[in-house]
Amino acid sequence: MEFSSRARQKHVRLAGDRREQYPHSLQFYLEPPTESISLVEFESFAVDRLKLLKVVENLGVSYVRGTDEYKSKLESELRKLKFPYKALAEDDYEARRKDHISHFILRLAYCQSEDLRRWFLQQEMDLFRYRFNELSGSLMQKFLEHVNLSFEAISEDLKNELANELSVSTPGFSLTKVKEQMFYKVGLADAVDLFRARRVFIKDGFAFVPFKEIDVIVLNNYRTKLSKALALTARSLPSIQSDERLQPLLNHLSHSYVGPDYSVQKNAGKISLDQIDALSVKSFPLCMRQLHRALRDSHHLRHGGRMQYGLFLKGIGLTLEQALEFWKKEFIRGKVDADKFDKGYAYSIRHSYGKEGKRTDYTPYSCMKIIMSNPPSQGDYHGCPFRHSDPELLKQKLQSYKISPSGITQVLELVKGMHYQLACQKYFELTHDVDDIGFSLNHPNQYFTESQKLLSGGREVKKESNNSGNFQQKNNSQESINSSSTPTSSSAKADTELEGLEAYFTED
Ligand code: SF4
């Protein structure tokens, strides 16, 4: 894939129509795209696929896969984002092209660590399963031939001869059903999962697989291919990392989430410092509740914690003046004297509000950023407790917050399946006593806003009459950088600049 610069190429297609590349709506993504595409298209394809995979993840936990509800919600998302949602019959060249290119972009972004690879593989597998099962029998057959997975159907004579064995060894297959369905002779290596689960009849080194179980084999095959491809892509990372246009984009995508970035201080000055203790219990997500407690207990937070918590507080509405007062009051109760605070820590707080240095107005961290980068070490309290806490400690913490035993079990199950944000959604439901959170959680500040909406019956955060001043004037140029609702190269730029800010926070 080659890329052209944003300035020269707007949203135009750079290559001609390559319809013949996509004879099927479904793909194994074996060949990377070779056409040139603009950076604008690159970004928009990547963001749309990320949105789709997030929906796949959410649906996979909220609904039983394959049920009508699951299928109709996924189809509607595919339609909305303009990915292929029906098979061959449709003239959906644009959708197929987008599907192909966006898969490869996210493959680049998500090959960078074991956690990312696992997440990407899981969502892509679920997406593929849904789409494969939506194919009609004949389209399935065509697809299998296309990807060289055509299995030999056994003759009627052989089926009749083996009818008893097939019925006994294939769960759910009566003799009548055996007669109705096609059976395929598949090499054992391709049918390991079915063989292990004792779901097929084995004879002479072949598994006899009913048509309805073929998806297991195809998925197995796809999983092997995709995990190998991800490992190979990871090996070629150094050459990708040397491309200065791509690397920030890919990094941003893998830490990215798709929603507002909470950089615009809509609620600036609406919260008083006296409210924070109560809010931390009622409306803070677990990560911020943990940071707040640690700060109150030890009157100090190390720089990872100050960054994560400080920007969150800014996002919920603390003005710069309030932030300075809040941190100072707490720190001078510990080992830091007022003079040291004013000389060191105060500068870094002003910096995070865009009042020092490059005057970048820093954006509160999204869940993906917290989950994926800068894991906490001993003595740190930042990070995501669902991702970074030992499950036993997490359990104790939830017990101390009076979460019911069954609720804790549900949260821990989600954590075990590495669905950290969904575990957090469950925590929201349990602490707010609602059955369905009704939104897809991507950001700690979103958690706060939704909680406040719910607790105040749909109203915005209540305005404090005695606020300590809202003198912060937003720098317009910064606003345009940060108000983007999707990960863009400018937000990637903000990420890079954050590293500059972190330098100011190195003092523990
Ligand atoms: Fe915080 Fe997000 Fe983790 Fe929830 S999922 S605890 S909001 S980082």
Image: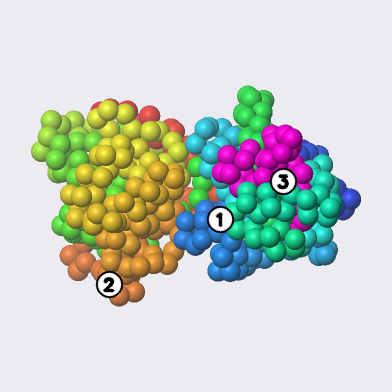
- Which three-letter amino acid code belongs to the residue tagged 3? Phe
- What is the x, y in percent for residue 463? 25, 68
- What is the x, y in percent for residue 416? 40, 43
Which one is closest to the eye, mark 3 or mark 1? 3
Which residue is tagged 1? Answer: 56
Q: Nearer the viewer, residue 349 or 56?
A: 56
Which residue is tagged 2? Answer: 456
- Which three-letter amino acid code belongs to the residue tagged 2? Ser
Query: Which mark is first along the chain, 3 or 2?
Result: 3
Q: Nearer the viewer, residue 450 or 473?
A: 450
* Residue 268 in view in this figure: no
Report how far apart the C-alphas of labels 3 and 1 lie in the structure.
31 Å
Residue at left offset 36%, top offset 64% = 450
- What is the x, y in percent for residue 334? 12, 34
Q: Nearer the viewer, residue 336 or 222?
A: 222
Query: Which mark is first along the chain, 1 or 3?
Result: 1
Which residue is tagged 3? Answer: 208
| 136 with respect to 232 (left or right) | right
Q: Are marks 3 and 1 in contact (CB under 8 Å)?
A: no
Disc 2 residue crowd, few under 14, some 14–19, many 20+, Cα 10 Å: few
Q: Secondary structure at mark 3?
A: strand
Which one is closest to the eye, mark 1 or mark 2? 1
